[in-house]
Every structure is written in C-alpha cells, then in structure tokens.
Amino acid sequence: MEKILKKQAKTFMTKKVIAVDENESIKDLFQLMDKHGILGVPVVNKKLHVVGIVTESDLLEHFTTLKAPRSINLLGGIIYLENVEEFNKHFKDHCAETVKELMTAPAFVLMENATLQDTINAMAKHRVNRLPVIDSKKKLVGIVTRSDVVHQLSKLKSV
C-alpha cells in the first residue's frame, strides 16, 4: 500500500492534457470540451503557465438565469434585501465572453513529483475533481483527475 501511495503524479497523470488559452472565447471552449468529452480544462497563458481552470460548474453558472436581488426603495434610496455580492458574481459570470472572465483563478495545481497521497490530500482539502500538474518551471505537463486516483487505488490488494 505504501508503495502505491508514494507514486509520483508524473507516473499516473494524463500527459496529453487538453488546455485552453486564457483569451479563448467561451464558445470555442464549449466546443473543445464537447468534442473531447471532458468536464474541466486548465487555462494557460502564452508561457503555458496555469492561470486558472474552467469546470462544468463554471460553464453552467454562465447560463443560469440572472435574478436581481430583491430591494425596496425607501426615502429615495435602495435597500437590498438579499446579498448583492452574490448577484455581482453571477452577473460577471453571466456577461463573460472569454475564458479569462469565466475561469476560477488561481487554480490549485500539483507538482509533477507530488505523491499519490499528496494528490488525494490536495483534492480533499480543496474539494476539486482535477488538478493540473506542473513542472519545476511552472509549465503545464499533465492533469490528474479523481478517476486517475481511483485507478491507482484499485491496484491495492486491500482498501
């Protein structure tokens, strides 16, 4: 068991990771994710450094119906009865046109020499389903998903 938990991410990550440039349009992002059947994509800059991540949750948020917070007009002023900050976040996501405007940033990343145990701990701590993997120069070299982790754990004789 200990041997598997000490495996480095670079040995079980997906090396042919599909990433998207931060300036790409949301329409192109949707098409890319649909074409490849993936639910999350690391977002990179021109140097291939991970600057964020877009998941299915971010995309669904983009298409939610926008509801203005309830308010009342009292003595010429507006008093909001609901959280305006929540509305502002949804409004920003609703109006996004580029990946940069929609992505979750910064993204939680994993170093390529991180162990399987490190990976499990990071996914649990940050409550994420995927972690982009970077090298010592901070360049994207792969991605680890929960499926990759489950596959590694399935090799254990006793769980």
Image (tube, rainbow, N blue to C red):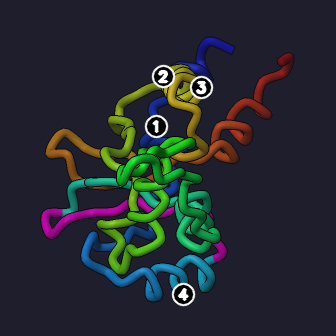
**Is 102 displayed left or right of 50 in the figure?**
right
Q: Residue at x 51, y 42 (%)?
A: 83
Closer to the eye: label 1 or 2: 2
Measured in 3D between alpha carbons, the distance from the residue under mark 2 to the one under mark 4, in whole angstroms, is 33 Å
Cβ atoms at labels 2 and 4 below 8 Å apart: no
Residue 40 is one of the magenta-drawn residues: yes
Please give the residue where the numbered disc 3 appears in the rendered image: 124
Q: Secondary structure at mark 3?
A: helix
Residue 127 at x, y = what percent?
58, 33
Is residue 104 visible to us here? Answer: yes
For image coordinates 33% across by 35% down, the residue present is 111
Q: Which residue is mark 1?
A: 9
1 or 3: mark nearer the eye: 3
In the image, residue 45 lies in the stretch drawn in magenta: yes
* SS category of the residue bearing label 4: helix
**In the figure, residue 157 lies in which quadrant?**
top right
Q: Mark 1 belongs to which amino acid?
A: Ala
Q: Where residue 118 is drawn, which disc sits there?
A: 2
Q: Amino acid at mark 4?
A: Gln
Assess whether mark 2 and mark 3 are in contact (beta carbons under 8 angstroms). no
Q: Earlier in the sequence, mark 2 or mark 4?
A: 4
